[in-house]
Image (cartoon, rainbow, N blue to C red):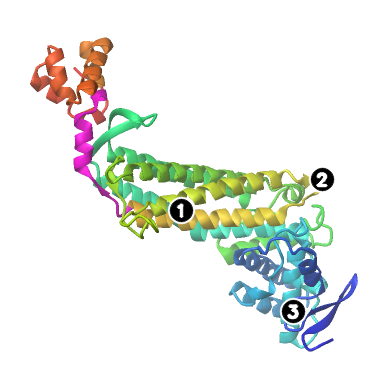
Amino acid sequence: MTENYRIEKDSMGELEVPAQALYGAQTQRAINNFPVSGLTLPPAFIKTVALIKKTAAKVNMDLGELDAALGNAIIRAAQQIIDGQHQQHFPIDVFQTGSGTSTNMNVNEVLANLATRMLGQNVSANDHVNRGQSSNDVIPTAIHVSAAIEYRKNLLPSLTHLAETLEKKAASLDNITKTGRTHLMDAMPVRMSQELSGWALQIRNGIDRINSALPRVYKLAQGGTAVGTGINAHPEFAARFAGVLSKETGLPFKPNESFCESLSTQDAMVELSGQMKVIAVSLMKIANDLRWMNSGPLAGLGEIELTALQPGSSIMPGKVNPVIPEATAMVAAQVIGNDATITLAGQSGSFQLNVMLPVIAYNILQSIELLGNVSRLLADKAIAGFTVREDNLQKALAKNPILVTALNPLIGYAKAAEVAKAAYKQGRPIIEVAAEMTDLSQEELEKLLEPSHLTQGGISE
């Protein structure tokens, strides 16, 4: 032992560990073995593993499997991690052993050392902190529990806020009509409220999709131990664990009816990620529409003006870019990429164990965090504050030759096409050209071609 290091021992022998580190030999071996990315599992995941250890200690004490003094010391140590302390002592790379054993032992060792200091007697990482558990049920359980907690805490409130902001904005713009577009080409008019309410429903549907996946997220692997048979766990451990955890978190966790399914697959996370991918696709559509509508200010569509947040160019003075929609689009791309990773990782359930658990944990939690953060930004810094350039909308509507579609039932498609082509070629309002080329009166045309009327559906008479 030197001033900077101490000697720790595990089943493979001795090695040096930093003197101030709360972790032990197995964590140090993982640090040495996996200098891959510098990416670590997020604090939300580490806190959840600590919560699992706290819950297991309570249950093991109740079942007579763990001495009360040892158990209470483990609980106190775990609570420190849950409260956000000691995060620097969890340095293991995401790209590690596929079961996440390195991370499980990292938490076991830190809790054992903390509990030993509190109690004044030895607390074992394996025999006490990890009692009745294995990495193979702890890590899948931590993935499910952390995803459920973070969804409730961050993503669900943010998506709900975005949907409500869109609905409020839509209601405020119900009297504004604009040129609709299909294939990016001029089409029949729509009200801005109709456009934004479509976006809002996308987000509401996304929430419903995630909520429909939650019953499978709430099913836990804990109690299945190494291969799904429950060996080395008390027969009542799984049910009691889920009950205590549910009370602790306020979420309806329960043991999976098949631990073999819980350990060998991550289907619930593949499903959850897929539902988040749908939300990412929705956000990409909304972000792109906002960018198009904001384009200009002179040579673009110029339909809306997003709030100016920062200078947009280091060389072009006065240029302001749609930075929030751009950030949203990048988040969407990242989440779609995360889903591809989770999908591939989900296929790696060889026989009794999935062996890409850490990368699933990292990506599922990143997707939840990114979608939650950017949804709130999109609501507050883009949707809530944009203004409408009504003069531009009205000029475009007046010259839109596609308005003639409303005359189809009265003059026929062929005649309507002639009117549209003439109006486009001459650059004149459609109502003027229609008055010259049809038998319809000015009064009839004004009624038939009034843009807001055309957003209400039905057949012209």
User: Are the two marked residues, 1 and 3, in contact with CB atoms closer than 8 angstroms?
Assistant: no
What percent of the width, then of the height, locates residue 253? 62, 56
What percent of the width, then of the height, locates residue 384? 32, 54
| Residue at 27% across, 26% down | 457
Vertical arrangement, residue 32 with respect to residue 280, above or below: below
Q: Quadrant of the N terminus?
A: bottom right
Which sits in the foreground, 428 or 178? 428
Indicate the secondary structure of the residue bearing disc 3.
helix
Q: Which residue is mark 3?
A: 68
Q: Which residue is mark 2?
A: 351
What percent of the width, then of the height, locates residue 135? 77, 61
Indicate the secondary structure of the residue bearing disc 2.
loop
**Amino acid type, mark 2:** Phe
Magenta segment, which residues?
A: 384-403
Crowding at label 1, few (<14), some or many (≥20) Cα neighbours within 10 Å?
some
In front: label 1 or label 3: 1
Q: Main secondary structure of the magenta part?
A: helix
| Residue at 42% across, 57% down | 376
| Residue at 64% across, 65% down | 48
**Amino acid type, mark 1:** Ala
Of callouts 2 and 3, the N-terminal one: 3
Separation of disc 2 and disc 3 at Cα? 37 Å
Indicate left or right for 385 with 338 as reference.
left
* Residue 112 covered by magenta stretch: no
Q: Which residue is mark 1?
A: 327
Snapshot quadrant of residue 42: bottom right
